[in-house]
Structure formats: C-alpha cells, structure tokens
Amino acid sequence: MEMKLEMDGTVAIVIASGSIDALTAPELANFINLQIQDGHTRLVADLAGVDYTSSAGLRVLLGAVKETRSKGGDLRLANIQPDVKKVLDLSGFTSILKHFPDRAAAIASYNG
C-alpha cells in the first residue's frame, strides 16, 4: 500500500493505492491519524488506486470519520472503485460515509 498527502486549501487529501487489508490497514490508520494530529480535520480519501478493502480497512475509515467529526471536520471518500464500493454498500457504510464520484466534488462539498 502506498499513501501520500496533497493539500487543496484547507482540505487534506489522502491518496491511497493498493489493497487495504489486515496487514496494510494499520499503515493507513497511522497515516490518517498523523494528518489529524497535525490539525487536518477536513480530509478527503482518494481511493482511485485502491482495488480491495477488507473489514480492517472499513474500520480504519470509520475510525477516521468518528475522529474528524469529533473535532468538527469529516473524512469524505472520492473515486471509489467498483469492488470497494460493493463492500461499502454491503456493509452499510455508504449511509455513514460521505462519498463522491471524484476528488473535486469531495473537496467542493466542504465549501457548501
């Protein structure tokens, strides 16, 4: 799994690629938590490069949403691939997590 951070104004964009499973989920959690500790509570997770997520990945995303929302922010998802979207749908997470077709829409959602 690879992760990098980009900024768009006050929105921190976490760009992930690879699979999110029991082995890689802790890496993603640490990366996201570092952003939150640095004061970034308006996050977008760009999942264009993520081809798979297990329940461990779902827990990371849910934990990040809870943490950012407790600080007045949010984590919003963008570019969800079909296999990952199916997992989110089946788990009921699409009703909890705000998701957008692309990064621009996710970023814009913070402005209105």
Image (cartoon, rainbow, N blue to C red):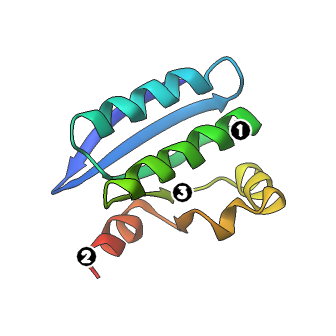
* Crowd band around label 3 with a 10 angstrom C-alpha radius: few (<14), some (14–19), many (20+): many
- What SS does tag 3 mark? loop
Residue 111: mark: 2
Give the quadrant of the N terminus.
top right
Please rate how many residues cluster around mark 1, counting C-alpha atoms within 10 Å: few if below 14, some from 14 to 19, many from 20. many
- Which residue is located at x 51 percent, y 29 percent? 28
Name the residue that disc number 1 marks: 53
Q: Mark 3 or mark 2, which is nearer the start of the sequence?
A: 3
| Residue 54, visible in the rendered structure | no
Q: Quadrant of residue 36?
A: top left
- In the rendered image, the quadrant that contains the C terminus is bottom left
Asked whether 112 or 81 is in front, the reply is 112
Q: Which mark is residue 37?
A: none
Q: Which residue is found at the position 76% from the left and 38% from the top?
A: 55
Residue 58 vs residue 47, the one in the foreground: 58
The location of residue 64, given as percent across then percent down, is 48, 45
**In this rendering, the label closer to the viewer, 2 or 3:** 2
Amino acid on which disc 2 is placed: Asn
Asked if residue 6 is positioned above or below residue 105 in the image, the reply reads above
**Amino acid on which the number 3 mark rests in the picture:** Asn
| CA gap, disc 3 and disc 1 | 14 Å
Q: Is residue 67 left or right of residue 39?
A: right
User: Which circle's residue, 2 or 1, is located before the other in the chain?
Assistant: 1
Residue found at the very far left of the displayed protein: 9
- On the image, the x and y values in percent for residue 40 come to 25, 46
Q: Residue at x 67, y 70 (%)?
A: 95
Kindly identify which numbered label has been placed on residue 79.
Answer: 3
Q: Position of residue 26 (x, y in %)?
A: 56, 22
Place residue 86 in its image quadrant: bottom right
Residue 60 coordinates in the image, percent (x, y)? 58, 38
Q: With 44 as the anchor, is 51 left or right in this view?
A: right
